[in-house]
């Protein structure tokens, strides 16, 4: 498989999971679109490792490989197709690599919502730091917490009740997964801080979370998605 074909397979996998992006993408400069897709495809790789079902050992080995890969980007020695796009950005890849082991710890059921967020705080901060450099956007406000909330929301959708903190499982009223979804949503601003690609991605993820918190599938019409992403793009 050629490098370009391999890259396309990773980008297409992310597009398949986020079909709403075709409406949001015009708000991104043409010159940045492949970079944005490659970055979000990389984050999806990390989400998949966090939310692995069954034996975690292969996923943990893959995560260790990614740590080595990210550290090699400082010396421009990428091996992965996504690295061909991302490596030229002089971002803090080493800091992101250092935060990756937190994903393994974050698989454990948290005692309460606060612990669930703390488990991913360093990872969220590392992701936000890379995005600040990648998209040349000064850090203003809390840019790490929205990344954490989005990661926890995706985890809830992927693994269900296994992602719910114990304190919410102990409550007897209602569905624990919906309670956790609603709690995440209450902390998640409708428009987050950070660069435009993050704001657009977060707006799509938050819309899904709203639907999940109500126990329904998202009906993402092009018009609704356009209005939502236009508002997010305004900053």
Image: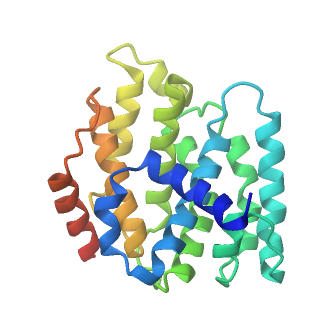
Q: Position of residue 194 (x, y in %)?
A: 41, 73
Look at the image and tell me whether residue 147 can be seen. yes
Query: Along the line of sight, which residue is nearer the eye, 100 or 11?
Result: 11
Query: Along the line of sight, which residue is nearer the eye, 142 or 195?
Result: 195
Query: Along the line of sight, which residue is nearer the eye, 140 or 156?
Result: 156
Q: Number of callouts in the render?
A: 0
Q: Position of residue 45 (x, y in %)?
A: 63, 51
Give the quarter of the image for residue 91: bottom right
In the image, 112: left or right of 194? right
In the image, 100: left or right of 51? right
The residue positioned 77% from the left and 33% from the top of the image is 56
Rendered view: 131 above or below 101: below
Extreme residue toward the top, this view: 172
Location of the N terminus (image quadrant):
bottom right
Location of the C terminus (image quadrant):
bottom left
The residue positioned 51% from the left and 33% from the top of the image is 158
Q: Position of residue 128 (x, y in %)?
A: 54, 69
Q: Position of residue 54 (x, y in %)?
A: 71, 24
Extreme residue toward the front, this view: 1
**Colour style of the rendered protein structure:** rainbow
In the image, 76: left or right of 143? right
The residue positioned 59% from the left and 34% from the top of the image is 110
The residue positioned 29% from the left and 32% from the top of the image is 217
Look at the image and tell me whether residue 149 can be seen. no
């Amino acid at each position: 498989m050629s490098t370009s074909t391999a890259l396309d397979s990773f980008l297409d996998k992310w597009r398949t999971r986020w079909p709403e992006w075709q409406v949001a993408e015009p708000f991104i400069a043409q010159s940045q679109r492949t970079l944005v897709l490659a970055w979000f495809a990389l984050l999806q790789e990390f989400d998949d490792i966090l939310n692995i079902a069954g034996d975690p050992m292969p996923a943990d080995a893959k995560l260790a490989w990614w740590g080595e890969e990210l550290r090699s980007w400082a010396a421009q020695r990428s091996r992965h197709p996504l690295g061909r796009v991302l490596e030229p950005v002089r971002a803090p890849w080493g800091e992101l690599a250092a935060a990756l082991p937190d994903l393994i710890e974050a698989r454990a059921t948290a005692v309460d919502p606060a612990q669930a967020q703390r488990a991913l705080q360093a990872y969220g901060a590392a992701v936000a730091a890379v995005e600040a450099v990648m998209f040349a956007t000064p850090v203003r406000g809390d840019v790490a917490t929205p990344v954490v909330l989005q990661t926890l929301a995706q985890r809830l959708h992927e693994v269900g009740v296994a992602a719910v903190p114990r304190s919410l499982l102990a409550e007897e009223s209602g569905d624990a997964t919906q309670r956790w979804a609603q709690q995440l949503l209450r902390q998640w601003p409708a428009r987050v801080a950070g660069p435009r690609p993050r704001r657009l991605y977060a707006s799509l993820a938050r819309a899904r979370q709203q639907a999940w918190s109500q126990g329904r599938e998202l009906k993402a019409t092009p018009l609704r998605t356009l209005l939502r992403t236009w508002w997010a793009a305004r900053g």
